[in-house]
Image: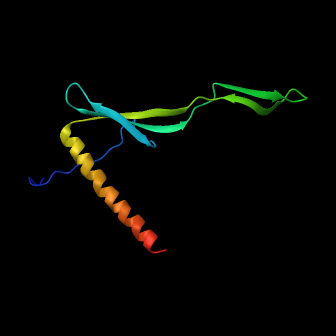
Amino acid sequence: MPDPKRLEFSYRESPAYRTVSVQGAYGGLTPRGDIFLGVYSERTHFPDTSILEIGPQGELGPEKFRITQGVVREVQVGLMMDLNTAKSLQDWLKTHIETLEAALKAQKDSK
């Protein structure tokens, strides 16, 4: 019989689940009053142009010239949340940041 004072949650990964590297975020308020947060990873841009030498037997040799422009911020996923969810996420992050900072300080102090 279920306990009326407890609620059990089960976690399942959706078929679209993936782990992404996050180096930053961009977003703001939506017209409906939610908070939108797009998280991105940064990487160098693939070259627009690359010129390679051709060797004596027609094989590709070393790269001699490359045109690359800037840094790519590839938006990995967008997160849409209401105010209560944002506050819960803020609390969750604060707790884990404090735990990590304490562990790093303890590690540094032990050296």
| Quadrant occupied by the N terminus | bottom left
Give the farthest residue toward the right: 56
How many marks do you count on the picture? 0
Classify residue 104 as left or right of residue 31. Answer: right
Horizontal and vertical percent position of residue 40: 43, 37
Q: Is residue 19 above or below residue 45?
A: below
Give the farthest residue toward the front: 70
- The quadrant in which residue 36 appears is top left
- The quadrant in which residue 46 appears is top right
Give the farthest residue toward the left: 4
Horizontal and vertical percent position of residue 55: 87, 30
Residue drawn at (63%, 29%), measured in percent from left and top? 47
Q: Is residue 104 above or below residue 26?
A: below
Classify residue 99 as left or right of residue 72. Answer: left
Classify residue 43 as left or right of residue 1. Answer: right
Horizontal and vertical percent position of residue 81: 25, 36
Residue drawn at (47%, 39%), measured in percent from left and top? 41
109 vs 1, nearest the viewer:
109
Horizontal and vertical percent position of residue 86: 24, 42
Residue drawn at (63%, 25%), measured in percent from left and top? 48
